[in-house]
């Protein structure tokens, strides 16, 4: 089982800033951490080579810039997401872990509601099967992102 922390909130309320703080703290404590960013935006402009390769039909595109690897794939095996904690940014209408909502209009299933990313927030471990989490992610906008 993996501890799953979910961050929800409107645009520009500080979800990513809070995710950065949580991830840094967990890493400081020696945990392995994976992050899942849910978005309706493409991760890169259509003019970039990796986008063009994906558009051409490549099942997987591996990008490397000398420092980091980025793997673009149309599906993922949940066993490949091996971490003590997974931080999920998004999925407001679903609950996949300990749900922290930032800003106004919290969903009824939020465990914690905070005004912004500046304050302290208690993070609890809610253990979830990562395969089940990715199955929920896979339903986002009807796209297949998990096997």
Image (cartoon, rainbow, N blue to C red):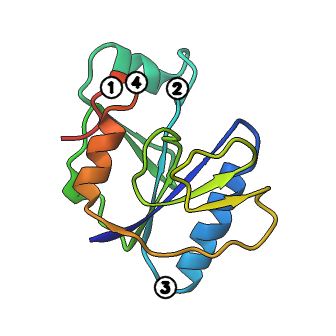
Q: Which residue is mark 4?
A: 141
Question: Disc 3 on helix, strand or loop?
Answer: loop
Q: Earlier in the sequence, mark 2 or mark 3?
A: 3
CB contact under 8 Å: marks 2 and 4: yes
Q: CA distance from mark 2 to mark 3?
A: 32 Å
What's the distance in space between the residues labelled 3 and 1, CA to CA? 34 Å
Marks 3/4: CA–CA distance? 34 Å
Q: Nearer the viewer, residue 14 or 49?
A: 14
Element under disc 2: loop
Q: Nearer the viewer, residue 20 or 69?
A: 20
* Dot 1: element: loop
Decide which of tag 3 and tag 4 comes sooner along the chain.
3
Image coords of residue 140 (percent x, y): 39, 31
Residue in the picture at 61% in, 69% down = 22
Q: Which residue is mark 3?
A: 30
Residue 143 circle label: 1
Of marks 2 and 4, the one in the foreground: 4
Of mark 1 and mark 2, the one earlier in the sequence is: 2
Q: Cα distance, mark 1 to mark 2?
A: 10 Å
**Residue tagged 2:** 40
């Amino acid at each position: 089982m993996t501890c799953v922390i979910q961050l929800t909130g409107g645009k520009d309320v500080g979800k990513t800033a809070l995710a950065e703080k949580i991830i840094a703290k967990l890493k400081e404590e020696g945990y392995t951490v994976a992050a899942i960013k849910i978005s309706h935006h493409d991760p890169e402009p259509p003019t970039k080579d990796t986008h063009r390769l994906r558009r051409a039909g490549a099942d997987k595109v591996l990008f490397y810039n000398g420092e980091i690897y980025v793997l673009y794939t149309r599906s993922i095996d949940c066993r490949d997401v091996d971490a003590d904690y997974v931080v999920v940014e998004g999925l407001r209408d679903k609950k996949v872990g300990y749900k922290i909502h930032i800003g106004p209009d919290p969903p009824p299933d939020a465990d914690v509601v905070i005004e912004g990313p500046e304050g302290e927030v208690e993070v609890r471990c809610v253990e979830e099967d990562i395969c089940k989490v990715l199955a929920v992610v896979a339903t986002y906008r009807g796209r297949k992102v998990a096997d």
